[in-house]
Image (cartoon, grey):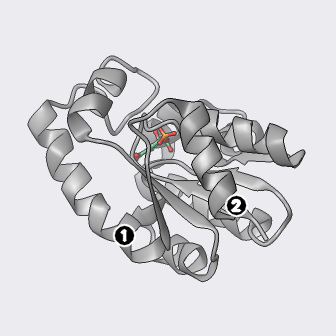
Amino acid sequence: MSIVLVGFMGVGKTTIGKLLSEHYDRPLVDIDTYIVEITQLPIPQIFENFGEAYFRDLEYKALQKWIGKDVIISTGGGIIESELSKDILKDNLNTFWLKCDIEILFNRINHDNNRPNARGKSLNELKTLYSKRELSYNEIAYKHIDASRPEEVVASEIIESL
Ligand code: S3P
């Protein structure tokens, strides 16, 4: 069964995914990286050229391809914007929600030009997005992990819970 990591931008999904991948000796599928590879376009370019809905569809198709395989899947923070992706994630028992305060995440993501949904946003705007998405993460993930701690601690807690 796949181990899937969900959570807001900047929470450490990819880094923790790498630690899990090393521990279990299973490939890491980073959905963002996979999409960049198949489209040969950087994420901001996909948003600009084709719109966010198109990107959400690519995420859904990538999730469909990888879910259920023996891999670690690191998702993009907005994957839960798609009801179709949410349904897939809900059915996967090992979906972990990495949680961290938005104030901490804001400092990590607000200067990042590679994240169209964070670029130029104020703390208040991101708080609104975070509150809305929290409901969805909560809906689909059976396991919640405090990701404000060092990455090794977070990865160990996931490993112990499996
Ligand atoms: C997004 C998060 C990003 C990436 C894209 C959209 C979002 O992934 O998928 O920029 O809407 O939250 P990370 O969570 O890895 O930053």
The answer to whether residue 58 is seen in the rendering is: no
Residue 3: quarter of image: bottom right
Among numbered discs 1 and 2, the one appearing first in the sequence: 2
Which residue is label 1 attached to?
138
* Residue 160 location (% of width, % of height): 66, 56
For the residue labelled by badge 2, is the local secondary structure a helix, a strand or a loop?
strand
- Circle 2: residue type: Ile
User: At 15% from the left edge and 50% from the top edge, which residue is drawn?
Assistant: 128
In the displayed structure image, the side of residue 123 where residue 81 appears, left or right: right
How packed mark 1 is, by other alpha carbons closer than 10 Å (few <14, some 14-19, many 20 or more), is some
**Residue that carries the numbered disc 2 in the rendered image:** 3
Q: Is residue 160 left or right of residue 2?
A: left
Which quadrant of the rendered structure holds the N terminus?
A: bottom right
Tell me the amino acid under the disc marked 1.
Asn
Residue 16 horizontal/vertical position (percent): 62, 39
Q: Residue at x 61, y 82 (%)?
A: 91
